[in-house]
Amino acid sequence: MRFSKRLFVIALSLCLFCVLVSGCGPAEQAEGKNGVPSEITITDSTGQEIVLTEKLGKVVVLNPPAAEVLRILQIPESSIVGVAESIQNSPFLGFDSIESIGTSSTPNIEKIVELKPDAVISQGKWLTGSDEFREKLEPLGIKIIALDVHQIDKYDQCMKALAKAFGKEKRADEFLEWKAEQEKKISDKVKNLAAEEKKKVIQLYGNKLPKNEWQTSSKGEQAGGTGPDQQINMAGGINLARDLEQDYPTINVEWIVEQNPDVILITSYDLGYAAEEDGGAAELVNLVLANKGVAATAAGKGEQVYVTASLASTPYLSAQFVAKWLYPDLFADIDPEDALKDYFDQWLGVPFKGSWVYPPLSK
C-alpha cells in the first residue's frame, strides 16, 4: 500500500514537471533570453522598418525632443553615450556630462563611430537623407532611427517606437495616457467655439524684437504645423500668419495693423527652467506696446500681449497657458502650471522651477 502511494506521488510529480517544462519551453523560445524578444521591429518617421536583434543598449541622440522622451522613459544615462550640443546644454535634461558629438545639424561622424552606439536617434528631416551619414554608419552596424518627435501628429508613434526598442512599453503607455488627459482638458472646452468666437492671434519671436524685426510662425511644411501654430490651434485660436509662405516669415507693423489681432503672443528663449523672475519678458511687452501701430490694434488697446517660454516639444502644455489667455472665463478652473509641474516632477524626474510665462497667471 505504501509502495503504491509512493509510486502515485512520483508519477504525479513527473506529470507536473512535464507540464511546467512544456509550459515554459515555447514561451522562452518566443520571447528569447530573459524575456526579451529575439527580434524587435520598429518603424521610424520616414516609414522605414528597423529590425533590432535585441533591445538598444547604447545610443547617440541628436534631437532634443527625443532626448526628452528618453528621460520620460527612464532610460539610464549609461545607455546614452553621445548627444548633440543642444542636448548637452539643456538646463533640465541632466545630460551635460555625456560626450558631445557636435551640433544636431553637423554631427561629428568620426566621434559617433568612436563611441560605438547601437543606433543614432535623429530627426526625419535632417541627416537621414544624407548619403555620407548613412554610408559611414550603417555598414558598421549602427542603425539610423529617424524620429520627428517635435511633430504633434507623430509624437505618440515616436515614443512608442523608442519604448519598444528599449523595452519600456509600460512606462510609455502610462505617460501617453496622462498626455491624452492634458490634451482633452483643452479640446473639451474649445470644441464648441463658433468661428466668430475664436480669437485672432499673432505670435512673435522675442529675440528679434530688440532689432526691430517682427518674425512670426506660419503652419509651415511639417504635418501638424510649427510649434507656435500647434499651440494656437490647440488653444482654439486662429493663427493669422498660418498661410504665409515661409515657415518663419518676417512681417511688418503695417501687416499686423491690417490683421488687427485680438492677442499677441511672444515666444522668449530667455524664459524657462533656468529663468529667474520675468527673464526680461516685461521689456518685450513694453517694446511691442510702444509701437504706435501695434498699440492701435485690438491686442494693443486691451494690452493682450503675453510672453511664453519655448515649449516646442510639449505643445499640449503651452497650449493650456495660451487657452487661458484667450478664453479666461472658459478656462477659469484650469491652472496650466499644475500640468507643467507634473511633467517635470512626475515624468522627467526633475524638480520643477523657473519662470515660464509673463505676466504670471493669477491663481
Image: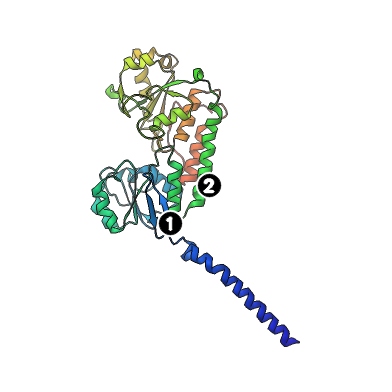
For residue 92, which quarter of the picture?
top left
12 is higher (above) or lower (below) than 151: below
Quadrant (top left/top right/bottom left/bottom right) for the C terminus: top right
Tell me: 179 left or right of 205. Answer: right
Q: Is residue 216 visible?
A: yes
Observer-nearest of 100 and 36: 36
Q: Residue furthest right?
A: 1
For residue 206, which quarter of the picture?
top left
Tell me: 338 left or right of 137. Answer: right
Closer to the chain start, of discs 1 and 2, is 1
Count of picture labels: 2
The x, y position of residue 156, in whole percent, is 46, 43
Residue at the image position 48 percent from the left and 41 percent from the top = 343
Q: Name the residue that disc number 1 marks.
A: 40
The x, y position of residue 322, in whole percent, is 46, 27
The x, y position of residue 105, in whole percent, is 27, 42
Observer-nearest of 261 and 197: 197
Q: Residues within 10 Å of mark 2 (few under 14, many from 20)?
A: few
Q: Name the residue that disc number 2 marks.
A: 174
Tell me: 320 left or right of 244. Answer: right
140 is higher (above) or lower (below) than 180: below
Q: Are marks 1 and 2 in contact (CB under 8 Å)?
A: no
Which type of secondary structure does the marked residue at label 2 adopt? helix
Residue at the image position 27 percent from the left and 54 percent from the top = 137
The x, y position of residue 204, in whole percent, is 36, 25
Tell me: 273 left or right of 138. Answer: right
State the colouring used for the structure image.
rainbow
Which kind of residue does numbered mark 2 sit on?
Answer: Glu
Which kind of residue does numbered mark 1 sit on?
Answer: Ile
Q: Is residue 93 visible?
A: no
Q: Residues within 10 Å of mark 1 (few under 14, many from 20)?
A: some
Per the model, the C-alpha gap separating discs 1 and 2 is 21 Å
